[in-house]
Amino acid sequence: MRSVAFVLALAGAALAPRAAEAKLRVVTTLPDLFALTRAVAGDVGAVDLIARFGQNPHDMEVRPSHMLLVRRADVLVRNGLEEDAWIDVIVRGAANPRLLRGSPNVVEASQGIRVLKVPAGHVDRSLGDVHPLGSPHYTLDPDNAVIVTGNIAAGLARVAPEHARAFEANRAAFLDRLADAQRRWQAVLAPFRGARIVSYHDSWPYFYSAFGLVEGGVIEDRPGIPPSPQHVAALIRQMRDAGVTVILQESWYPRDTAKLIAQETGATLLVVPQSPGAVKGTEDYISHLEYLVGAIADALK
């Protein structure tokens, strides 16, 4: 009976109204949203993260600890575009109806984003882990961080309207820092505009678009499936013909194929984290982009 009472108490806590003086409890699905939400929430919010730093979101394993975080939360910030679809399982297990899809307590961070790489025609599992709604990696374009932080500020203000001015002030301060950083990043990558880059996974269209870079190919011929020898051979020929000098790969993917292609083409294999926090000193959004821009510029030199 004690265990039943404990579960009921937790469920009641999830439904209890938030005290006005208490910190707003916000849970985020992915590290980039965690970083952007902290920038907006400031001292008003206690922000938690579900996916670990440096973790492939496709390899997410739902744990009871995730449900506990969500059960206690006032607000959920989710990526959308099916990148973090596992959050629906966590929310149902947490028995927190405030955080169900469509609730005013849920921030759909992708709202208003111009989505790239939306597949044409029918999509099924034979095509691999294709995102049917388009590429979900939109935070790699810093212009999209402007939109995302706007969505976050509005969502936090819906739940804690007494702090709406603080959220907007925090966002404005962040956007000032971001604008300064963007000018610096554009200058760093300006000499390489038009450069072609091959990536292991098709994760970088927003970054390419933001900085005038060009997709030179993708090692995976189908997302989430190791490439065939025929595809690898064709990609090597393509890279040689186009003079591609950089292969970009997230740290969570296997490297053997990329190393082979780098050896065959003379390209530099650059292994980088796609999201904040995987490298010490890159826990916030701007420092993470700073790291990526610097590493990619160095590889292109």
Image: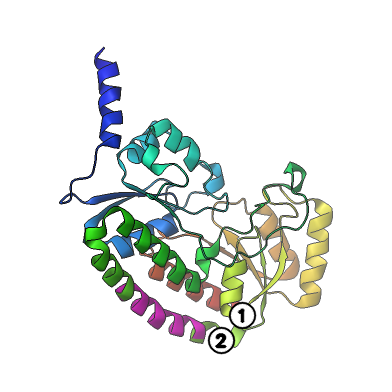
Front-most of residues 81 and 112: 112
Q: Give the image quarter of residue 150.
A: bottom left
Quadrant (top left, top right, bottom left, bottom right) of the N terminus: top left
Q: Can you give x and y, in whole percent of width and height, for residue 284 in the image?
A: 36, 64
Which mark is on residue 212? 1
Q: Can you give x and y, in whole percent of width and height, for residue 99 in the image?
A: 40, 43
Q: Can you give x and y, in whole percent of width and height, for residue 207 in the image?
A: 57, 71
**Residue span colored magenta:** 173-186
Label 1 CA crowd tier, 10 Å (few <14, some 14–19, many 20+)? some
Residue placed at 46% from the left, 47% from the top? 102
Amino acid type, label 2: Ala
The vertical placement of 83 against 247, above or below, is above
**Dot 2 lies on which element?**
helix
The vertical placement of 300 against 275, above or below, is below
**Dot 1 lies on which element?**
loop
The vertical placement of 210 against 249, above or below, is below
Q: Can you give x and y, in whole percent of width and height, for residue 78 in the image?
A: 45, 51
Q: Give the image quarter of residue 286.
A: bottom left
Which mark is on residue 10? none
Residue placed at 61% from the left, 80% from the top? 212
Front-most of residues 70 and 226: 70
Which mark is on residue 190? 2
Query: Which mark's residue is nearer the viewer, 2 or 1?
Result: 1
